[in-house]
Amino acid sequence: MWQYFFRRSSLFLATTLIMMAVLFYATHLFPVDQTYALTGIQQPTNQQFVQIYQDFKLDSNYVRQFIAYVQQRFSGNMGISINSQQPVYDELKAVLPASFELSLFSGAIALFLGVPIGVIAALSKNKLVQGSILGLTLTGYSTPIFWLGLTLSLWFGVNLGWLPISGQINLLYQIEPVTGFMLIDTLLSDSAYRLQAFVDAIMHLILPAITLAVLPFTLIVRITHQAMLHVMNQTYIRAAEARGLHTFKIIIRHALPNAMIPVLKSIGIMLGSFASYGIVVEVIFSWPGVGSWLVSGIYQRDYTVIQAGILSVSLLIIFLSILIEFIHTVINPMSKKELYASY
């Protein structure tokens, strides 16, 4: 198992280096001076100019420049934002928690609703129920995310006025950032209106979270449905039924844990699509996360922000994909059997 872990770690490092090489190459394609693309300093002083050349080894060959580029980026030197003139690293730390909060909330919605509905679709004898669930998931999967977000905003935000359609919290609430997660920071606040602020933060989170959860929800329902149909026909399930075990106990203790293995694998596969949809959702609902920050940087030609945004999103996708694959291998007996047989 440790050999497999080190292989996955090596894959993470190799993929990261390839992605960094692409970003490094892109800095030479930007229609600006390279020092400007690397640091965001448009008119550096003589001292700054010398420092940039020393930090990024611009007077050396491309190999040394690439090594210096990787060292600077992973040491936190991402330059300054061309538009705000603030360190990009500080801005990235400020927007990352909002994206994590939205992703975790929408992922929880998709998982805790998708798995039970998938089980119901697999075990129900009513063809109408099965067809309705699968038809609903197919509709959700086929619906464009930008159209869904705008439609939900129009219905529940503009026409009915039930939910806010932009931002993370009402600007009337002055919440000091502690963790960066708004739901946590509102509860940690010593303000007299912290509970009202907490409720307001949840209300702001509902529409973007539901919009982002539609894609993983539909996939989880369909994969859970297929996995449960397969598992319920296995010999050990038939044996448990023959021993007189209650159906609920068979599902919870035997069928569902095995059916969750392909669901876990599918979550790792959909991370890239989930991240791209997250960027669209953040723009639609003006959510102050990495996605809207990155798109704003693209519109404003903020080259340092573009590099930092792509770097952070790519690293998260690579890391989480490999982590989920590792967990899938650990909990899946068939994967472990194949793993040990390969040594």
Image (cartoon, rainbow, N blue to C red):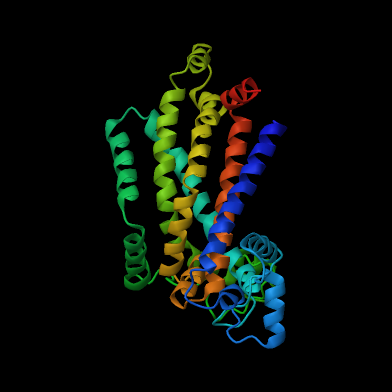
- Seen in the picture, residue 13 relative to 174 is either above or below; the reply is above
The picture quadrant where one finds residue 133 is: top left
The residue closer to the viewer here, 202 or 87, is 87
Q: Position of residue 181 (x, y in %)?
A: 62, 65
Q: From this viewpoint, is residue 300 visible?
A: yes
Q: In the rendered view of the protein, which quadrant contains the N terminus? A: top right
Q: From this viewpoint, is residue 199 visible?
A: no
Q: Position of residue 332 (x, y in %)?
A: 58, 28
Counting every numbered tag in the picture gives 0
Q: Position of residue 333 (x, y in %)?
A: 60, 24
> Residue placed at 32% from the left, 66% from the top?
155
The picture quadrant where one finds residue 179 is: bottom right
The residue closer to the viewer here, 191 or 278, is 278
> Residue placed at 63% from the left, 74% from the top?
79
Q: In the rendered view of the protein, which quadrant contains the C terminus? A: top right
- Seen in the picture, residue 73 relative to 142 is either above or below; the reply is below
Q: Position of residue 60 (x, y in %)?
A: 67, 67
Q: Is residue 227 left or right of residue 159?
A: right
Q: Is residue 200 left or right of residue 162?
A: right
